[in-house]
Amino acid sequence: MPVVIYDIEAGSLAAKAGIVPGETLLSINGREVNDVLDYRFLIVDRHLDLSLVRPDGEEHHVILRKSEYDDPGLLFETYLMDKQRTCRNKCVFCFIDQLPKGMRESLYFKDDDARLSFLFGNYITLTNLSDKELQRIIEMHISPVNISVHTTDPELRCRMMGNRFAGEALRHLWHLAEAGTHINCQMVLCPGLNDGPQLDRTLADLTPLYPAVQSIAAVPVGLTDHREGLYPLTGYTPEGAAAVIDQIDAFGDRCVEQFGSRICYAADEFYLKAGRPLPPPSFYEDFCQLENGVGTITLLKDQFMDALHYEDFQLDHPREVTIATGVSVAPTIQSLIDEAVKKWHNLTVHVVPIVNTFFGTSINVSGLVTGTDLKRQLKGRRLGSEVLIPSSMLRFEGDLFLDDVSVTELAETLEVPITPVSVDDGQNLLDAILGIGTN
């Protein structure tokens, strides 16, 4: 599929070769360019023969000679150079189906695009993947691929994902593993559906695929207050969460004995729900499932305490700030603050857990806190000189919360500056608390 060139980077190889916006890219070194995966794979060559069509319809060739990792400088209207592929499933646990009405349109888009798995780490279900696309991934040695498995029982997978082809699509996982593609797996666990004996089956099917399957994460289903007409699901009780931890840890222990790697992990949310202490850093090996909330709290504590030990910053004047965060991580943040104020006696930090009334009180992660809830629960409090918030509360551009409240609007309401902070990094969190880099 020909791709139209939207713009050219100034001073790039393409600009020097005289390529102009509006030309159509047909092929590179004789191979058709359909999307960003083709393009990124083909431009690695040092010698590029670009087949192009000028806006007037004239076809011509441009030869570029470059080092292996130089980019030619061609820009396209969309990053994928193609339309983003939407999800074909109707999962019983889908969080997007649980969003309230009236939010910005982009939040209701469900992606299930294998290209985004490679480029940005998104998880895919495989139901959108054709045999031809699978072969392309294998030939290009694209790795890792992140897959939402949920269950390896084909019939149950069809039922949970609302797609009669969901069970059959599992064949792609086995083919990828056979080809040596590195795979990260994800399971959204729903009480009474894919936990218990079904979880045992899934782990028994996946763990022998090591080292192709390099990690497996289990996360609990997230339930909002907006589930009218949806499949009846319940959240995890402390006892249920503890049972999941025990199951996964038992498999993990056997994997350590057999392979030297734990492979499978329960998300931090299970430990918090069960009231159990989180494992030490060594348990998580290389922390390969942070995006699924596996080991994030342990890593944060370890980094923060390490930074605290080595930080020699002098706080010359009293400093008072507020950290507004999700309910689940607030006790951890408070424990870290307690250690920090032992070292800096003129430091005052108010940790405020924000109850999620927008989505529902069972939703307690920081990334789903809205500007509306921040306004209501922080207004009238003593906040100090600024309010620190996890940057995960904001969209990629860093300006809007999920409910379209802007950072500027929140700052005007509270009459203090709002500072987004990456609370996944202990050093960044400590720096922000102390005002390092802002004073």
Image (spheres, helix red, strand yellow):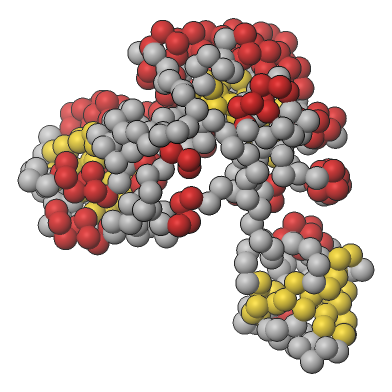
Image spot of residue 362 (x, y percent): 33, 28
Q: Nearer the viewer, residue 361 or 430?
A: 361
Left or right: residue 63 compared with residue 24: right
Q: Is residue 93 above or below residue 19?
A: above
Q: Is residue 17 above or below residue 375?
A: below
Could you tell me which residue is drawn at 69 percent across and 51 percent down? Answer: 115
Q: Is residue 49 above or below residue 426?
A: below
Image spot of residue 206 (x, y percent): 71, 20
Left or right: residue 239 compared with residue 437: right
Q: Residue furthest front?
A: 229
Image spot of residue 439 (x, y percent): 21, 57
Left or right: residue 275 compared with residue 148: left
Residue 415 is at least partly visible in this image: yes
Quarter where residue 344 is shown: top left
Could you tell me which residue is drawn at 38 percent across and 41 percent down? Answer: 367
Q: Nearer the viewer, residue 15 or 236?
A: 236
Residue 296 is at least partly visible in this image: no
Q: Nearer the viewer, residue 72 or 431?
A: 72
Could you tell me which residue is drawn at 16 percent across and 45 percent down? Answer: 376
Quarter where residue 174 is shown: top right
Q: Residue furthest bottom?
A: 56
Could you tell me which residue is drawn at 41 percent across and 30 percent down? Answer: 223
